Structure formats: structure tokens, C-alpha cells
Amino acid sequence: MSDAPVIALTTGEPAGIGPELAVMLATDGATGTTPGHRRVAVGDAGLLAERAEALGRALEIVELAPGEPVPETRPGRLPVWPVALAAPSRPGVLDIRNGDYVLETLDRAVAGCRAGEAAGIVTAPLHKAVIREAGHADFTGHTEYLRDACGVDEVVMMLATDRALHATGPDWQGPRSLRVALATTHLPLREVSDAVTPERLTRILRILDADLRRWFGLAAPRIAVCGLNPHAGEGGHLGREELEVIVPTLAALRREGLTLDGPLPADTLFTPRHLAEADAVLAMYHDQGLPVLKYAGFGRAANITLGLPLVRTSVDHGTALDLAGSGRADPGSLAVAEALAADMARRAARD
Ligand SMILES: NC(=O)C1=CN([C@@H]2O[C@H](COP(=O)(O)OP(=O)(O)OC[C@H]3O[C@@H](n4cnc5c(N)ncnc54)[C@H](O)[C@@H]3O)[C@@H](O)[C@H]2O)C=CC1
Ligand SMILES: NCC(=O)COP(=O)(O)O
């Protein structure tokens, strides 16, 4: 049996594109053969078989018992850690009866990592609203769910375009190569300002600095930090969060040795001159940073949860209910995210 790391691929919302993306990876000539890692899907085996049939792809689904070794990845075969759907699922049609199912796939993957059966997790997209409507009123996303499942206080969501996953130094240049981390994740805009506290910023920036060193081989990561307000507050005339929170927090962290630029006006930070001088950008909120990242690399970017005790990467997109079942969804981001999880798992094994 190979010692290539096992990556658990949670197949996400059953009515979304996740299951068919897993089928695409498993049947594709390039991604179906991954000598560097072994893939095990986590989800309903019957659902995956249905999606494979609908796409016209020949796929042998191999249900694994707990503890059974994950075989080598080869095209046309998909080992599965089975989790049963609560109700049949049709592409594009959400069903709150399957809300728990999605969380159970995550729990199975985390348990697999804890038991040493898997070295990392890559997640296909889930649908946040349907999970909340299924009774999990506090659910906001994988990132926060995995934080709580792993018992850590803070994690950082960072998305990176594929060119930025391994690049350092002179390779890090220009708008197509971008790493964007978020100070706040899934919050209504109204709550963002209150959430940007010295304590949170300090935790986030320490994790970002440490994990850029750990996973991206950067000896002294340069982090460009966005302001919260237009023109980074215009000297206090357009908001005081910069003067009262961000500036003093960055100053304290610089004294700890972090290399931080900012707070900078977010509208001009994402220009080549500034990006050329930064290894990552910290945006204050979701839609301040992610539209730029997706403009630069949608479909070829990965989402990484920093600060977890396990490896977790994900796609740069959501459930795309409008495409589910059509076979037109692009599996590019899932392939990038899975390859990154495998790289991180190998790095973790070496360290
Ligand atoms: N990692 C995750 O689990 C994520 C989950 N979501 C969730 O997904 C649900 C839907 O979110 P939306 O904002 O509508 O974003 P979305 O990414 O699902 O869709 C936005 C647009 O992008 C297109 N698109 C998405 N993925 C694509 C792919 N692989 N290939 C081609 N086109 C693609 C869709 O067709 C749609 O036009 C929400 O519940 C959201 O919370 C969103 C982002 C990440
Ligand atoms: N837009 C990114 C996103 O929503 C990712 O959410 P999750 O990975 O925390 O589920």
C-alpha cells in the first residue's frame, strides 16, 4: 500500500455541483491519476453513482469500511467513506432534510484526520442557508464549523490564486497572483465594524504570519493590510476604526517582528505596485477582498483555512445550483484545492 497522503474530499451540498465535480475529478485523465496523494470522497455512494451516470462517466464506486486502507487513486475509480443521505436529492433542488447529512460528511472527514486515516480535507461547496434552515441557526460556513470542531479560538480564511500557491519572491507579482486573507468572514456588513477589534486583528495577523511561513515557505511574510473605511478613514474624517483600532494594533505587531504595511486604502491596495511589495493582503471583510481575488483567478483559486490543527482547503466558488446536473460546472478550483491539500499534507509530514 502506498504511503501517499490520503485527502478526504467532502462532496458538499447534494443538490449542488459538489458531487458532480468529485465525479469529474475521479474520471478525468489528469486529476483521476494523482501519484502524489490518494483521494477518498465522503458522501452518499448512491448519489455519486447517480451523478456519474447522469454525466455519462464510467465510475466504479468503492465503499470503504472504517479503517480500511484507501487504495491508490486511478481514473474511473472513486473510494468513498459512505455517509447516507436523509432524503433523495435532485440537482438544483435544496432539501432541508439533507442539512445534517452535509455536516455529517464534515464530521466523518475530521474523524478520519484525527484517526490518522486522512492527512487533510478538501471540501466541495455546501449551502449555508439550507443548513441553517435545517436547524443549525448559528452555522455560517465550513471555516467556522471546522474551527469549532477542532476546538481552536480563531482561524483565518485565505484564498489564493493558483499562481500564488507556491510562488515566493520574484514570482510573486501582479494581479494574477494573489493571496487574500479576511479579518472577518461571514458577517452581515452592519456587524463588521464592531468585529474589527484589536484582539481579533492581533489573533488573525499572528495566524496569517505564522501560516504564511509554515505553508508557503516565506521567511518574513509581508502583509498589506486594508483599511476598513473609504480612503482608510481619511485621517478620521470618514471613520475612526483605522486610527483607534487598526493603526495601534499594527504598531504593536510590528514590535513583535511582523512585517505589515497599512492600513492602506483598499481601492488602491489591489494595484500591481502595492501587490508587488506584499506576500498577502488582509482585507477587513469578505466582499472587500474576495471580488478582487475572484476577478484575478476564479476557477483556479483555492480557499485555505489557516490556524487549524489539520489541513483544510476548499474551492473558490459555491454550490452553483443553476449549473447542478448540467455537467457544465468547472472542476478547476476543486482540482487546485485538492492538489494544495496534498502538498500541505506532505509538508506537514516532513516537518
Ligand atoms: N466553500 C463553500 O462551501 C462555499 C459555499 N458557498 C455557498 O454557495 C451558495 C451559493 O453561493 P453564490 O453566492 O450563489 O455563489 P456560487 O459560486 O455558487 O455561484 C456564483 C456564480 O458562479 C457560477 N459558478 C460557481 N461555481 C462554478 C463552477 N465551478 N463552474 C462554473 N461556474 C460556477 C455560478 O453558476 C453562478 O453564476 C451559498 O449558500 C454560499 O454560501 C459560497 C462560496 C464557498
Ligand atoms: N466565499 C468564501 C466562502 O464563503 C467560504 O466559506 P466556507 O469555506 O467557510 O464554507
Image (tube, rainbow, N blue to C red):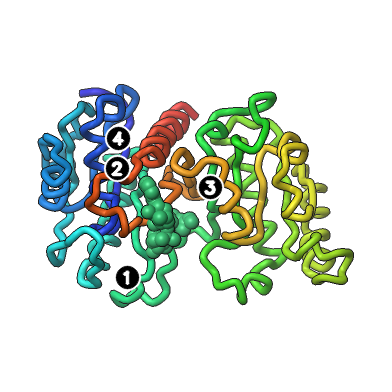
Give the amino acid type for the residue marked by disc 2 in the picture: Ala
Q: Nearer the viewer, residue 159 or 37?
A: 159
Q: Earlier in the sequence, mark 2 or mark 1?
A: 2
What kind of residue is marked 1? Val
Rounded to the nearest angstrom, the CA distance separating label 2 from label 4 is 6 Å
Indicate the secondary structure of the residue bearing disc 4: strand
**How many angstroms separate mark 2 from mark 3 (CA)?**
25 Å
Q: Position of residue 286 (x, y in %)?
A: 57, 60
Q: Residue at x 25, y 30 (%)?
A: 28
Instruction: Identify the element where label 2 is drawn.
Output: strand
Residue 104's x, y, as percent?
25, 60
Determine which of the numbered discs, if any, sits on residue 130 in the image. 1
Residue found 53% across the figure and 46% down from its top = 159
- Classify mark 4: residues with Cα within 10 Å, few (<14), some (14-19) or many (20+): many
Q: Residue at x 86, y 64 (%)?
A: 234
Q: State which image quarter holds ligand 2.
A: bottom left
| Residue depicted at x 33% and y 47% | 114
In this rendering, the label closer to the viewer, 2 or 3:
3
Q: CA distance from mark 3 to mark 4?
A: 28 Å
Instruction: Residue under label 2, please give it.
Output: 8
The amino acid pointed to by label 4 is Val
Circle 3 SS class: helix
Between 78 and 234, the one nearer to me in the picture: 234
**CB atoms at circles 2 and 4 under 8 Å apart?**
yes
Quarter containing the N terminus? top left
Q: Which residue is mark 4?
A: 6
